Image (cartoon, helix red, strand yellow):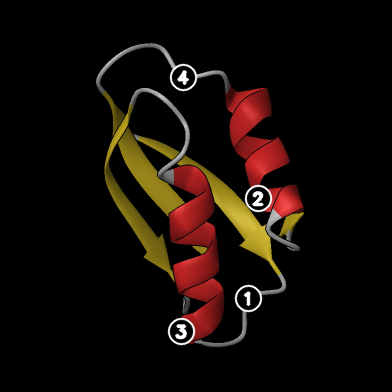
Amino acid sequence: MKSVKIKGMSCQHCVMAVTKALNEVAGIKDLEVDLSRGEATFEESEPVDMEWVRNQIRKAGYEVG
């Protein structure tokens, strides 16, 4: 399981925005975005480019911690 820390999420809308952004990344499955931990965790169905993951989070308006 891979995880990435996310800064700036404060509500369920934030969770939905990050979830939507990360669902666009090929290879991510079983995605969970946890507001209280400020973290997204996921499994890979194929190798995932973590820089793309970080860019998707930034594009959604949040910081990668």
> Is disc 1 surrounded by few (<14), some (14 to 19) or many (20+) residues within 10 Å?
many
Mark 1 lies on residue: 9
> Is disc 4 surrounded by few (<14), some (14 to 19) or many (20+) residues within 10 Å?
some
Mark 3 lies on residue: 12
The amino acid pointed to by label 4 is Val
Q: CA distance from mark 4 to mark 2?
A: 14 Å
The amino acid pointed to by label 2 is Ile
Mark 4 lies on residue: 48
Image quadrant in which you'd find residue 45: top left
Q: CA distance from mark 3 to mark 1?
A: 8 Å
Q: CA distance from mark 2 to mark 1?
A: 11 Å
In this rendered view, identify the residue nearer to me: 39 or 52.
Answer: 52
> Is disc 2 surrounded by few (<14), some (14 to 19) or many (20+) residues within 10 Å?
many
Tell me: residue 53, above or below residue 18: above
Mark 2 lies on residue: 57
Q: Secondary structure at mark 4?
A: loop
Confirm or deny contact between disc 4 and disc 3 (CB under 8 A): no
